[in-house]
């Protein structure tokens, strides 16, 4: 940038005073100041626009890299799933031919049926459609109890009035 010291500014001011005259010098100084301010704003806008463009290019490159990485991960996952699916099908075909494998499958199915039956029985115990006498006879909950009521029910019965002092 131009190096303007105090002595150079004084020389420019004296020359301007002589050339322009004392009557028009304040108006010219205001106009030069406003033009200088406009030039600074214009340069600032250009700099910010250039920096935005650079950031936008960087973001585009980053987006491209991320999308390529996502596509590669997706392809790897699909390939892995396809391999696992093929392995499961191959093992399923191999197990069906074995009698011991079919016994294991039958045993696991029996276990699943038992778990489902127990789940339905427990759900019936919780369900409000079951009569209260049945719940009382078989140990189910008859009604919901709040926390304060539970504390009162199970608090040891001692003296009714107790003082800290």
Image (tube, grey):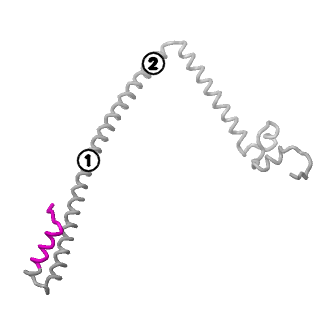
- Find the residue positioned furthest to the right: 159
Residue 48 spot, x, y in % from top left: 24, 59
Q: Quadrant of residue 9?
A: bottom left
- Find the residue positioned furthest to the left: 19
In the structure shown, which secondary structural element does the residue marked by tag 1 occupy?
Answer: helix
Residue 47 spot, x, y in % from top left: 22, 59
Q: Is residue 18 magenta?
A: no
Q: Nearer the viewer, residue 47 or 88?
A: 47
Marks 1 and 2, how far apart at CA? 49 Å
Q: Nearer the viewer, residue 28 or 92?
A: 28
The secondary structure making up most of the magenta span is: helix
Q: Nearer the viewer, mark 1 or mark 2?
A: 1
**Label whose residue precedes the other's in the sequence (1 or 2):** 1
Is 133 placed left or right of 47 in the picture?
right
Kindly identify which residue carries mark 1. 58
The 10 Å Cα crowd at callout 2, few under 14, some 14 to 19, many 20 or more, is few
Kindly identify which residue carries mark 2. 91
């Amino acid at each position: 940038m131009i190096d303007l010291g105090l002595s150079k500014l004084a020389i420019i001011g004296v020359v301007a005073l002589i050339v322009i005259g004392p009557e028009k010098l304040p108006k010219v100084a205001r106009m030069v100041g406003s033009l200088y301010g406009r030039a600074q704003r214009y340069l600032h806008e250009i700099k910010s626009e250039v920096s935005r463009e650079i950031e936008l290019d960087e973001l585009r490159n980053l987006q491209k890299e991320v999308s390529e990485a996502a596509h590669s991960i997706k392809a790897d996952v699909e390939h892995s799933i396809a391999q696992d699916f093929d392995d499961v099908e191959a093992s399923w075909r191999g197990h069906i031919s074995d009698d011991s494998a079919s016994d294991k499958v039958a045993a696991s199915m029996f276990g699943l049926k038992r778990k489902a039956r127990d789940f339905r029985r427990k759900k019936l115990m919780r369900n409000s459609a079951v009569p209260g006498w049945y719940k009382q006879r078989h140990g189910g909950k008859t009604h919901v109890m709040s926390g304060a009521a539970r504390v009162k029910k199970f608090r040891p019965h001692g003296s009714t009035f107790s003082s800290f002092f």
